[in-house]
Amino acid sequence: MGPGDYSMCFIRPCQLLGLLLLLPGFAWAAAMTPEPGVSRALAESRADRISDVSYRLTLDIPAVQDQPIAGNIAIEFYLADRQEPLQLDFRQGAGHVLSVHSTGPGTGAADRSRVDYRVEHEHILIPARVLAEGRNRLEISFIAGDESLNRNPDFLYTLLVPDRARTVFPLFDQPDIKARYQLTLVTPEDWDALANAPLESKQTVDGRSRYRFATSELTSSYLFSFVAGHFQRASRKVDGREINLLHRETDGDKVARNLDSIFELHAASLRWLEAYTGIPYPFAKFDMALIPSFQYGGMEHPGAIQYRASSLFLDEAPTDAQLLNRATLIAHETAHMWFGNLVTMAWFNDVWTKEVFANFMAAKIVEPAFAHMDHQLSFLLDHYPGAYRVDRSRGANPIRQPLANLNQAGQLYGPIIYLKAPIMMRQLELIIGADRFRLGLQKYLQNHAFGNATWPDLIAILDPLTEQDLRRWSEVWVNSAGRPRLQLETAADGSLSLRQQDPAGQGRAWPQQFAVSFGEQSRDLDSGASPVILPGTPTQLNSNGFGYGLFPLTEADLDGLQDKTPLARGALLIDAWENFLDGSLASPDRYLAFLLDNIAVERNQLILGEMLDQLYRVHSSFISAAARQAVQPQLEAILQSAMESSADPGRARLFLESYAQLARTGDGLGYLRDIWDGSVEVEALSLSENDRIALAENLAIGLPDQAATILASQRKLIANPDNLRRFDFVAAALSPEPAVRDQFFASLARVEQRATESWVLDALDYLHHPTRVEHAGSYVLPSLELLAEIQVTGDIFFPTGWVNATLRNQYSPAVVATVTGFLRQRPDYNPQLRMKILQAVDIPARASAYHRQ
C-alpha cells in the first residue's frame, strides 16, 4: 500500500476498535486472550475468583483399548465476580467437547440451558453472561483424552502430574484450586477399580460394572487418580485400617514372599508420620496399585498410591540396597500424604518442597526397620552422587526455579529437587535443632491443612526459631545453583585453614556443618564465608559426609581405604570420584586399578554398589580401547571370583549384575551364558524370571551370532504377560543388525511408539550399549531434535531419561561436538531442556578429553 492509499481510510483505527467492541462476539474475544497451558496470570486470577469447587465425573471405559472413552462432568463452584468469561482447562480439540449446559443461578431458568461455549488454545470458554456471582453449576459431555490414561489391552491408570488432568477431562487444573471429586467408572464386568475415595457401590448389568466412589477430601487436580482393569486384589487390616493392594504379578511365590513386608512397611510409615506430625492420617482410606512398567518409582495419589511393581515385588535374595530402597520409596510416598497432599504447594515452582519433605522424612522413617544399617551412609550414597551429577555440570539449576506456565512444570523435576534439597534440609535442621524443627513443621501443617503454602510461608515459621537469617541462608542454598570448591591454605606461620570458593565467581558461601578427621580424632566445623582455622593437619576432610562441595584430595588420601569406618569410606569414595572427574586426582587407568583393588574386599553392600557403578563408568567411558582390552581378563576374573565366593546372596547379586554389564571376552560371555541357561549355578543365587530376561538381553548384544537363538529360547520361558510385551518391544533394539536397530530407532519418532516410557528407555540403553556407541552416535542428533516434542508428549521424567540414555555411554569428541553444535545453533532453545542436555553431556565431555587424537 502506497502513501496515497491512506486517503481511503475514513475511520481511524481507534474508532474501528470501538465499533468492533459493540459486536457481541468481538466483545467476548477482547475480554480475554487464552493461551495454551495454565499461565501464572490465569491461575492467580482464577484462585482469586473461584472457590468451593466440586466435580462429579463419570467415565465409560470400553473393553477395547482403542475405542473412545465417553465422559460427563458436573462442575460446581463459587464465583466471586463475572466480569470476564470463564476458562476451563481441556487439552483436547473442539471435537472432544460434545455439549455444555448450565443449571441453577445465572441461566435465567431453573432447567438446564445449553451454553454457547468456545474451545480455544486448550480451554473451554464459558461466556460471562451465563455465570452468576455466587454458586454455579456446569455440565459437560465430552470424549476423554487418552494421553494420560495409560491405556493397555486390559488395564489403564491415570498419571496426571503436573498438569495432565486437563488432557482427560475439563476442570480448573492448578494446584491451589483444591476440589472434592466424586467419580463413577463404568467398566467391563471382570475389571477391578480403585480411586482416591472409598467405594460406595458396585452394580453389574449386561456385562458392565458401575463403580461409584464416595466424594473425596479437598484434593489438588494433579492428585486425582483411578486405576481399572484386570488386577488381583490383596487386603490386610493393619492397626485397625484396611489396606487394599491391586497387582498383576503372576508369580504366586513372589507375591507371597513380599506382601507381608509391603503392608507392614506402609503401616510403620503411617505410625511414624502420625507421631512426628501430631496429625492423624488425613484421608478416608489408604490403598495402592502396583503397576508393571510404571513411569516412576511411585506416585502419591491420596487413597490410591501407584507404584512400579518391580520396586515392591522384589526377586528372591534382594540386596541390602534393594530392601532399603523399597522401604524408602514406601516411606516417601506415605510422607506425601501430609507433605504434598494435606498441604500442597500453591504453584509448581515450589513442587520441590513436597519432594524434599518426602525424601527427608523417608530417611528418618526407615531407620527403625533397618537398625543394622548405617543410615548416615545410606543418606550419603543415596543423595550426594546424584546431586553432584547436576551441580558439577554447566547445566546446574537451583532448587527453586521460576515457572511461568504449568505446561512447563514437568521440566522442573530432576535430581536437584529430589537429592540436593534433602541435603539442604538436613543442614537446615542442624541450624535450628531437631526438636524445634519438628515443632515448626507441625505448625506449618496445622496452619495450611487441606490448603496451599509456599516456601516463604515455611521460612516465615522457621526463621524465629534460630538466630541465623534463614532468608539470606535460603538465597544461596535454595535460590542459586552449584556447589562450593573447598581449598586448604597454608599461612605464613604454617597454620592451615579451609576456605570456600565460589566456582561461579559470585562470592557466594554455603553455610554448612561437617566433620574433619585428625588421626583418630574428629571435629565438627562450621564452614561459611570466613576461612576456618584448622587445629592441625587433617587426615580426611568431610569425614562424616555432611559437607557439600568439592573437597580436595590426593592419591595418597586413598591409601588405607578399608581401615576407615563405613561412613568415612563412603564419603572418601564420593569425594575421590568428584576429584577424578575434576581431573585433579588420578588417571583413568590408575583410578580403575584403585577400584579393582577394593571391590573384592569391600564388605559393605551400599559402598560396594557405589564402587561398581564407578567401575562401570570408568571402564565404559574413560579408559582407552587398548587399556580396556588389556584389563578385561583381570576385571572379569575379579568379579567372577567375588561372586562365586560370596555367601551373602545380596552381595553375590551385585557382582552378577556388574559381571553381566561388563563381560566382553569370549570366556566371560560363555560363562554368563552358562549361568543363564542353568549349566552353571552360583551357590548364593536363585535366578528369577526378571534375572534371566536381563541376562538374555545382555547376551544377545555380547554374542551377536547367537542372539536370535538366545532371545527365542528366553521368550518361550516368559510366563508374565506384561514381561512378554516388554520383551517383544525391546527385541529390535537387541538385534545384531544395524539396519534393524536403525528402523526401530526411527519408529520412536512416532508418539504412539513411546507410549510405555520405561520400555523405551530400556531399548535406548541397548541401542547405546557401550559396545555399540560408535554406530549409536548417528542417533544423537535426531534424539536431541526430538527432545522438545518428548517434553510435550511425555511424562515428567521422560525428557531427562531420554537424553541421559542417549548420551550416558558416549565419549567421543565428535558426539560432544554434535551436542555443543546443537545448542549453539539454537540460542533461543528451551532453557530447561538446555540445562538437561548440559547435565547429560557432562560425563561424556569429561571422558572425551581422554579420547582426543
Image: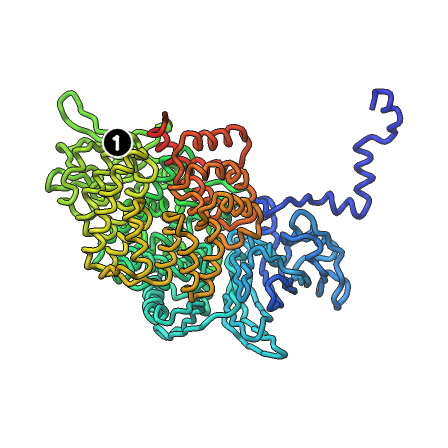
Instruction: Identify the residue at horizontal 50%, vertical 31% (top origin).
Output: 823
Q: Nearer the viewer, residue 775 or 599?
A: 775
Relative image position of residue 641 (x, y in whole percent): 20, 51
Question: Up-down: is 329 above or below 503?
Answer: below
Name which residue type carries label 1.
Ser
Q: Residue at x 49, y 48 (%)?
A: 348
**Compared with residue 127, is residue 586 higher up or lower down, i.e. above or below?**
above
Most extreme residue toward the left is: 520
How far across and down, in percent of the image, does residue 109 sit?
77, 66
Question: Picture quarter containing residue 405?
Answer: top right
Position of residue 603 measured from the top left corner of the image (x, y, whole percent): 19, 52
Instruction: Give the quarter of the image for residue 586.
Output: top left
Q: Which residue is at a point 14% across and 26% down the rendered structure image?
A: 495
**Farthest residue toward the front?**
705
**Residue 817 horizontal side relative to residue 650, left or right:** right
Can you say which quadrant of the picture contains the N terminus? Answer: top right
Q: Picture coordinates of residue 536 (x, y %)?
A: 12, 32
Quarter of the figure with residue 59: bottom right
807 or 324, which is in the foreground?
807
User: Which quarter shows the C terminus?
Assistant: top left
Asked if residue 219 lies left or right of residue 472, the reply is right
Secondary structure beneath disc 1?
A: loop
Q: Is residue 795 visible?
A: yes
What colour-coding does the image apply?
A: rainbow
Q: Badge 1 is on which residue?
A: 587
